[in-house]
Image (tube, grey):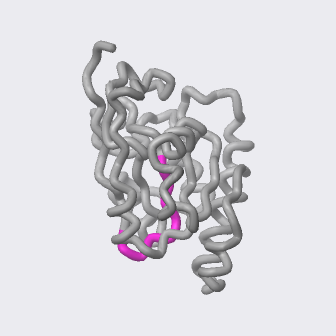
């Protein structure tokens, strides 16, 4: 397959992160602007605004996410991919990020939320069988990509709200972390 390797970004996370949101790999617009979810029709930031009141410039939004103990990253650190479609990711060249190192540094992560089915599939393919990840709840969420127009924004928002808002409230309210961690994986 011809094309240039798309390189991902470092994680956006504080050591006290409780929720890790994973995409597959940044699209071309995000890479060009060096921002997570930079495409103006991507619904990630509008969903974060609706759920948590996150708004402002890019760096302000990141700081607000961190204050909510939410981390952002992608499953892949790089891969050949012409364009921005997840379907065009070349799996032979795909390089997953180092989640073992990430989770050693961020021991409080209780939920991995996948932004889209492809992120969930990539994680399962490259990392899902490692025992280290079995104790962390996982939830698949509808993709916020403008390429996933089959689902209305209002439906995406409700699905994201069901998982993230309740998880954030649980973690902030001091509910027993072991009970939450052992509640099992939730597939949405």
Residue at image point 43% right, 61% down: 71
Seen from the viewer's position, the closer of residues 118 and 84 is: 118
Res. 68 in view: no
In screen coordinates, is 172 left or right of 86? right
- Relative to 129, is 50 on the left or the right? right
Q: Is residue 18 in view from this perspective?
A: yes
Q: At x 46% / y 35%, what residue is drawn?
A: 40
Looking at the image, which residue is at 61% across and 63% down? 137
Placement of 54 over or under 74, stated as above or below: below
The answer to whether residue 27 is left or right of residue 186 is left
Where residue 119 sits in the image (x, y, percent)?
52, 41
Magenta residue span: 14-22
Residue in the picture at 49% in, 69% down: 109
Q: Could you say which quadrant of the image residue 75 lies in?
A: top left
Q: Total of numbered circles in the picture?
A: 0
Q: Quadrant of residue 146?
A: top right
Quarter holding residue 186? bottom right
Q: Seen from this angle, which residue lies furthest top?
A: 2
Q: Is residue 132 above or below residue 130?
A: below
Where residue 139 appears, x then y in whole percent? 63, 54
Image coordinates of residue 36 in percent, x first then y, are: 39, 45
Left or right of 94 on screen, residue 69: right
Q: Quadrant of the N terminus?
A: top left
Between residue 98 and residue 45, name the one nearer to us: 98
| Residue 29 pos. (x, y %) | 36, 31
The answer to if 83 sits in the magenta stretch is no
């Amino acid at each position: 397959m011809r094309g240039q390797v798309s390189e991902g970004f470092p994680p956006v996370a504080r050591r006290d992160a409780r929720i890790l949101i994973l995409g597959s790999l940044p699209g071309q617009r995000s890479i060009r602007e060096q921002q997570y979810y930079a495409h103006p029709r991507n619904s990630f930031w509008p969903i974060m605004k609706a759920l948590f009141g996150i708004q402002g410039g890019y760096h302000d939004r990141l700081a607000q996410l961190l204050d909510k103990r939410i981390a952002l990253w992608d499953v892949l650190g790089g891969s050949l991919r012409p364009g921005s479609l997840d379907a065009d990711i070349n799996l032979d060249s795909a390089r997953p990020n180092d989640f073992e190192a990430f989770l050693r540094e961020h021991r409080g992560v209780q939920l991995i939320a996948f932004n889209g089915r492809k992120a969930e599939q990539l994680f399962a393919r490259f990392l899902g069988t490692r025992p280290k990840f079995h104790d962390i709840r996982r939830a698949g969420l509808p993709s916020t990509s403008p390429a996933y127009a089959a689902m209305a924004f209002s439906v995406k928002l409700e699905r994201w709200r069901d998982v993230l808002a309740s998880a954030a409230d649980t973690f902030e309210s001091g509910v027993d972390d072991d009970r939450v961690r052992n509640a099992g994986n939730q597939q949405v």
